[in-house]
Image (tube, helix red, strand yellow):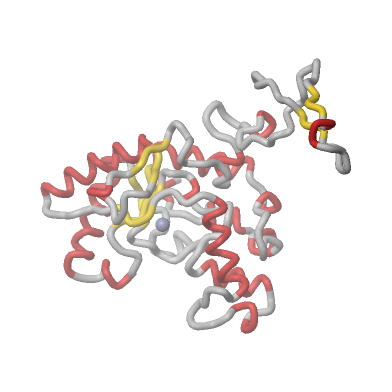
Amino acid sequence: MRYAPIAFLIVCFGCTSDQQTVYQPQTKPKATTVSNFEPARTITDTFSIDYVIGKFDPATHPDFTLIDKSVASNGEMRMRKDAYHAFLEMRKAAKEDSIDLKIISAVRPFYHQKRIWEAKWNGARKVDGQDLSKTMPNPVDRAYKILTYSSMPGTSRHHWGTDIDINSLEPAFFEKGEGAKTFEWLAKNAKDYGYCQPYSQKGEIRPHGYNEEKWHWSYNPVSLELTNLAKRYLTNEMISGFEGADAAPKIDVVGKYILGINQECK
Ligand SMILES: [Zn+2]
């Protein structure tokens, strides 16, 4: 690592401003900034634990790109370039079958998810019309309730830039008409472009995790590696840094939610 020269300003309270001294150190100072990619947390050439839990900035990450607003609900979303190129190919093929695919949500970093989670945790944002901080004092019950709709920070596949929500977040949209046709097309063809549906129907085959999301699709050539890294390196205790995080080990959020996905994405 190279260090830029740093000048320390010794501030003397009570001195006049011309008595303040600029001190130029003779030796290189020790780096004190904590990088998102600390060597100790790097687990492969490409990914770190911090990447897996969404603690990096997609705006400056070289593997990410802005999503063109012609294929999305707004022009401010980002995702991984590899997943984006595959999506564009899939969108082109869908168009030929008169199916229109639009991205309505893409990468969401840890701190974005933390804001959503804590607003629900504290009651600033109601869940099913309830202020959960009042109606659910038990932290595990409250966490389970929020998990019905939102990921716990550090456990969302949206941290990875490989996962996108397509067309609508309403289960009813995919039940008939255009929505049903779109889902049918994706269920049949998405795998040809590397995409799979991680939150498939819950039941005997997928007993744990989030409810079915017909809009959520994952670019498996990359997300499979990230799932495997989570399985190998992530513990429930690492899911921390937000209100309600103590519930993570009690729920086994890593085992049940991160790994509670469709077999086709494993
Ligand atoms: Zn999603």
Q: Please tell me which residue is depicted at 64% across the width and 59% down the height of the picture.
A: 252
Q: Position of residue 25 (x, y in %)?
A: 80, 20
* Relative depth, front residue between 64 and 162: 64
Q: Position of residue 22 (x, y in %)?
A: 78, 26
| Above or below, 175 relative to 56 | below
Q: Please tell me which residue is depicted at 67% across the width and 54% down the height of the picture.
A: 240
Q: Is any part of residue 157 visible from this angle?
A: no
Specify whether 49 is left or right of 165.
right
Quadrant where the N terminus lies?
Answer: top right
Q: Position of residue 74 (x, y in %)?
A: 31, 54
Specify whether 34 is left or right of 131.
right
Q: Please tell me which residue is depicted at 56% across the width and 61% down the height of the picture.
A: 115
Q: Is any part of residue 215 visible from this angle?
A: yes
Quadrant where the C terminus lies?
Answer: top left
In the current view of this chain or complex, which residue is farthest to the top?
A: 26
How many numbered marks does the figure carry? Answer: 0
On the image, which quarter does residue 81 sit in? Answer: top left
* Relative depth, front residue between 178 and 27: 27
Q: Please tell me which residue is depicted at 84% across the width and 31% down the height of the picture.
A: 19
Where's ligand 1: which quadrant? Answer: bottom left
| Above or below, 114 relative to 143 | above
In the current view of this chain or complex, which residue is farthest to the right?
A: 14
* Relative depth, front residue between 2 and 216: 2
* Relative depth, front residue between 132 and 5: 5
Specify whether 2 is left or right of 265.
right
Specify whether 252 is left or right of 173.
right
